[in-house]
Structure formats: structure tokens, C-alpha cells
């Protein structure tokens, strides 16, 4: 029997509205898992990257080892990274999060450190002359001025994490990657295309939201431009 002319699922077409309507709940669950894994990974990476960048800025001898180790971690293939972490985290979402955190450190640490180093020394001296202590100087002067470079790293790390989450499908925690992986195994065209497009949409939306946040947090950069 031939498939009815209006049955795009039976014909296994790439673009199929019936797939969207019939798998709405599955797609929604996959999107939520994808967003959760991405957000948790990037936030944990940011929490770790800030003190590492501060240490590398304060002690020059630490900059080389910190940047070197994080760069080496970034060069490890994703499948190898998950295999190395598997004995520690097992087949769990924590395995995917841990891998993404390690990958994000290179981008975050390098950009935060570059932003801190770009703060003019005369600005620091002026703040010290106004009675700013080390903590107040860091919070009120250095970190705000380093924000544009730090946000650039955060945007790249976030977009990279959106892409890398899909690799988590090998352990069953890949968000939309689960649908892409299963769709490729069964040659389900609509599922592969829909999940892939949603990954791109998430990446673009996250980048635009972070760009908007950067512009709101750094109004002086708009005036300069």
C-alpha cells in the first residue's frame, strides 16, 4: 500500500507538521532537558572560572598553568572526556554536566582574565586614591570594566554548550540530542531535522539574550560606540 498523499509521517518527509503536533510533549521535554543541562553547566563553569581567572591575574606564575590546563581539557574529544568521567559519575546527567563544565573553562577563564588585564592601571590607582580596598576595587571597578570581555566568553561558552549537550545522547542525557540520535538510527527525517533546528534556535536565542544582558550591564560601551 502507498501512503496517503497527506500523510507526511508515513512518507517520512523532512518537513512534517504532523510530527510537531503528534510529538509536542516529547519535543518539549527534550527542550527543557537541553536548556537545563546547558544552564547548569555554564553557571557551574562560571563559578569555577572567576576565582581561577582572579588567581591567574593576581599571581602571574599561576596564569600559565591555569590557561594551559584548561586549554588541554578543551582539546580532549567529547567521547573520550565522557569515558574518562564515567567511573566517577556513571550514566547520569551529572556526567554530561561535568564534561560541559570542563569544556567551558577554557573560554570563560581566558576571557575573564583578558578583561581583568585590560583594566587600565591608572583607573586602579585612582580608585585606590579614593579609598577603595581590594574587595571594593574588584567588585566596583575591575569586574564591571572586565564585563564586556567576560560576556563575550560567556556567549561563546553557552553556544558551545548548546551544541555539546547533544553528545550526551550516548548516555541518555542529551536533550534534543536524544531525538537526533534515535532519529538517525531509524532514519526518521522529521525528527532529525526538527531537533536540529531547535538546537540552532536555542543557541541563537541564548546568544541574543546574553548580548542584550551585556548591553544593559555595560551602558558605557554603547555611548562609546
Image (cartoon, helix red, strand yellow):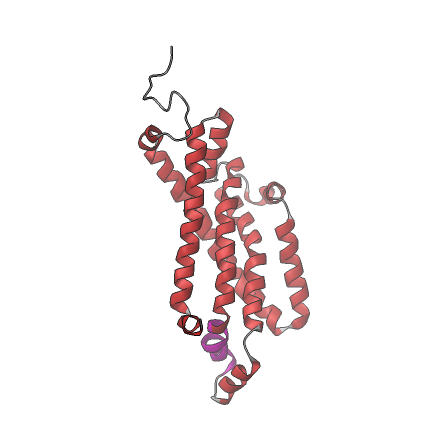
Q: Which residues are magenta?
A: 133-144
Q: Position of residue 52 (x, y in %)?
A: 58, 65
Quadrant of image for the C terminus: bottom left
**Residue 138 part of the magenta-drawn span:** yes
Q: Is residue 10 above or below residue 34?
A: above
Q: Taking 26 as reference, is 133 left or right?
A: right
- The tally of labels here is 0
Q: Taking 21 as reference, is 128 left or right?
A: right
Q: Residue at x 50, y 61 (%)?
A: 152
Residue sitting at the far bottom: 129
Task: Name the magenta segment's main secondary structure.
Answer: helix
Q: Is residue 57 above or below residue 186?
A: below
Quadrant of image for the N terminus: top left
**Residue 177 part of the magenta-drawn span:** no
Can residue 94 be seen here? The reply is: no
Q: Position of residue 12 (x, y in %)?
A: 42, 24
Residue closer to the observer: 123 or 11: 11
Q: Residue at x 61, y 68 (%)?
A: 56
Q: Residue at x 38, y 20 (%)?
A: 10
Q: Is residue 153 above or below residue 20?
A: below
Q: Position of residue 122 (x, y in %)?
A: 55, 84
Amino acid at each position: 500500500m502507498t501512503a496517503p498523499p497527506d500523510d507526511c509521517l508515513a512518507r517520512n518527509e523532512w518537513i512534517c507538521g504532523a510530527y510537531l503536533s503528534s510529538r509536542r510533549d516529547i519535543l518539549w521535554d527534550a527542550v527543557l532537558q537541553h536548556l537545563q543541562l546547558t544552564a547548569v553547566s555554564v553557571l557551574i563553569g562560571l563559578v569555577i572560572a572567576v576565582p581561577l581567572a582572579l588567581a591567574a591575574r593576581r599571581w602571574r606564575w599561576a596564569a600559565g598553568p591555569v590557561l594551559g590546563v584548561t586549554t588541554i581539557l578543551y582539546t580532549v574529544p567529547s567521547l573520550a572526556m565522557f569515558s574518562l568521567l564515567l567511573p566517577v559519575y556513571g550514566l547520569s546527567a551529572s556526567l554530561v554536566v561535568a564534561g560541559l563544565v570542563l569544556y567551558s573553562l577554557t573560554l570563560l577563564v581566558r576571557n575573564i582574565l583578558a578583561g581583568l588585564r585590560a583594566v587600565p592601571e591608572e583607573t586602579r590607582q585612582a580608585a585606590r586614591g579614593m579609598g577603595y580596598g581590594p574587595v571594593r576595587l574588584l567588585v566596583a571597578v575591575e569586574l564591571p570594566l572586565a564585563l564586556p570581555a567576560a560576556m563575550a566568553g560567556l556567549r561563546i561558552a553557552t553556544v558551545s554548550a548548546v551544541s555539546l549537550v547533544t553528545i550526551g545522547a550516548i548516555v541518555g542525557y542529551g536533550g534534543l540530542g536524544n531525538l537526533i540520535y534515535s532519529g538517525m538510527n531509524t532514519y526518521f527525517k522529521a525528527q532529525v531535522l526538527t531537533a536540529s533546528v531547535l538546537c540552532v534556535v536555542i543557541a541563537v536565542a541564548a546568544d541574543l539574550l546574553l548580548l542584550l544582558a551585556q548591553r544593559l550591564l555595560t551602558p558605557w560601551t554603547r555611548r562609546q560606540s
